[in-house]
């Protein structure tokens, strides 16, 4: 065998070896998992921040083998569209409020209704109770698994006139979430209610379709309602809770190692928001809202609660008849 032939043979073996190594490495490259997470809320909102923390934790703990892409600001539709896509498996994850209950477990939607829970601690105790577990089971049966929950802040009211009592709310056109129980409660309080998707919240107030709204500080500020609303009324009517959710079938399709990473990251991201962000962000936002033109109003909270009580009791005997208000408050 000539020297040239030997050289060619060595080169050929080297090339084959390199190709073999590349082919052998393909399964490693193919292991990368991309998760799409949708949110109706804009960048900077606590729901989006929760998603970003989850993405950071998952990518770190999986050493880059899991990548989370967040589509915020309603890029994949409003909350209802997001939850329906999550249920169907069109997207893998959603970071949202408690819209899944309103859509899929209406009899448990009192977890997201005004003037029922006095504080977040009471809400968490009820959510951890057998009643809360039944609500979560219904969501699981609809292919939605909750990885974590966190407090976004209390829901307050915005308007273009000061509101101190339910009498001041009478006849005011108010944007509320798309839920019949909310319609009944706020109508009882005197408002003329209009169900508007979050993605249309700003424009509805800007054009006068609505004159008032309600929501936590992160919602009020991230949607720039200070530009179209003069007054911030501290009605404090509901601890507003956010969720990190995943499509159950997608999660179960993953390797157990990845499942563990995702489950732990969901809990840790929610805990991070509760312990590091919520209080700090809300304190900063009320100052910003005032600096940017809103006037804070302290209403008669008891007057609103007492006015709402009859309709809330009625709803527990009709729509929310899986439990009683007394049982919920006993936890």
Image (cartoon, helix red, strand yellow):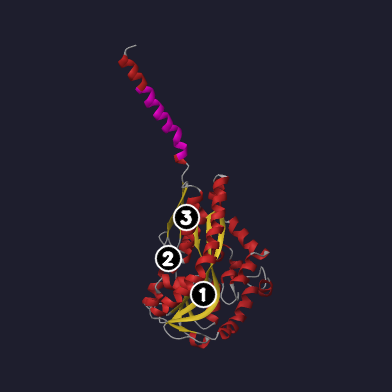
Residue 22 in the magenta stretch? The answer is yes
Q: Which residue is drawn at 58% across and 77% down?
A: 115
N-terminal of the pair, mark 1 or mark 2, is 2
Residue 159 in the magenta stretch? The answer is no
Number of other residues with Cα within 10 Å of mark 3, as a class: few under 14, some 14 to 19, many 20 or more:
some
**Most prominent secondary structure in the magenta stretch?**
helix
Image height of 234 relative to 88, above or below: below
Furthest-top residue in this view: 1
Query: Which range of residues does the magenta coloring cover?
Result: 11-28
N-terminal of the pair, mark 3 or mark 1, is 3
In depth, the one of 326 and 276 nearer the eye is 276
Query: Residue 56: where, in percent of width, then height?
Result: 47, 55
In depth, the one of 120 and 302 nearer the eye is 120
* CA distance separating discs 1 and 2: 18 Å
**Residue identifier under label 2:** 44
Foreground mark, 2 or 3, reads 3
Foreground mark, 3 or 1, reads 3
Query: Residue 49: where, in percent of width, then height?
Result: 46, 62
Q: Can residue 167 be seen in this view?
A: yes
The label shown at residue 56 is 3
**Residue identifier under label 1:** 155
Number of other residues with Cα within 10 Å of mark 1, as a class: few under 14, some 14 to 19, many 20 or more:
many
**Mark 3, secondary structure of its residue:** helix
**Mark 2, secondary structure of its residue:** loop
N-terminal of the pair, mark 2 or mark 3, is 2
Quadrant location of the C terminus in the rendered image: bottom right
């Amino acid at each position: 065998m000539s020297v040239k032939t030997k050289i060619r043979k060595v080169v050929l073996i080297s090339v084959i070896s390199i190709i073999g190594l590349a082919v052998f490495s393909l399964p490693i490259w193919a292991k990368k998992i991309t998760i799409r997470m949708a949110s109706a809320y804009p960048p900077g909102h606590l729901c989006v921040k929760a998603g970003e923390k989850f993405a950071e934790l998952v990518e770190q703990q999986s050493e880059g083998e899991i990548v989370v892409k967040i589509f915020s600001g309603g890029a994949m539709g409003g909350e209802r569209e997001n939850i329906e896509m999550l249920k169907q498996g069109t997207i893998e994850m959603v970071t949202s409020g408690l819209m899944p209950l309103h859509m899929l477990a209406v009899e448990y939607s009192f977890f997201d209704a005004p003037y029922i829970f006095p504080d977040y601690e009471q809400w968490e105790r009820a959510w951890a109770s057998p009643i809360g577990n039944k609500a979560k089971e219904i969501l699981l049966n609809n292919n939605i698994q909750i990885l974590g929950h966190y407090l976004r802040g209390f829901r307050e009211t915005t308007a273009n006139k000061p509101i101190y009592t339910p009498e001041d709310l009478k006849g005011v056109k108010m944007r509320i979430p798309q839920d019949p129980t909310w319609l009944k409660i706020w109508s009882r309080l005197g408002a003329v209610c209009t169900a508007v998707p979050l993605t249309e919240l700003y424009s509805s107030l800007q054009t006068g379709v609505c004159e008032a709204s309600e929501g936590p500080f992160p919602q009020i500020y991230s949607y720039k309602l200070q530009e179209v609303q003069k007054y911030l009324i501290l009605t404090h009517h509901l601890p507003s809770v956010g969720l990190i959710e995943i499509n159950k079938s997608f999660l179960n399709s993953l390797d157990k190692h990845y499942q563990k990473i995702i489950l732990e990251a969901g809990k840790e991201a929610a805990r991070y928001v509760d312990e590091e962000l919520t209080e700090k962000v809300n304190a900063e936002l009320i100052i910003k809202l005032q600096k940017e033109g809103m006037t804070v109003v302290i209403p008669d909270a008891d007057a609103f609660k007492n006015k709402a009580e009859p309709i809330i009791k009625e709803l527990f005997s009709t729509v929310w008849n899986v439990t009683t208000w007394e049982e919920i408050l006993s936890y």
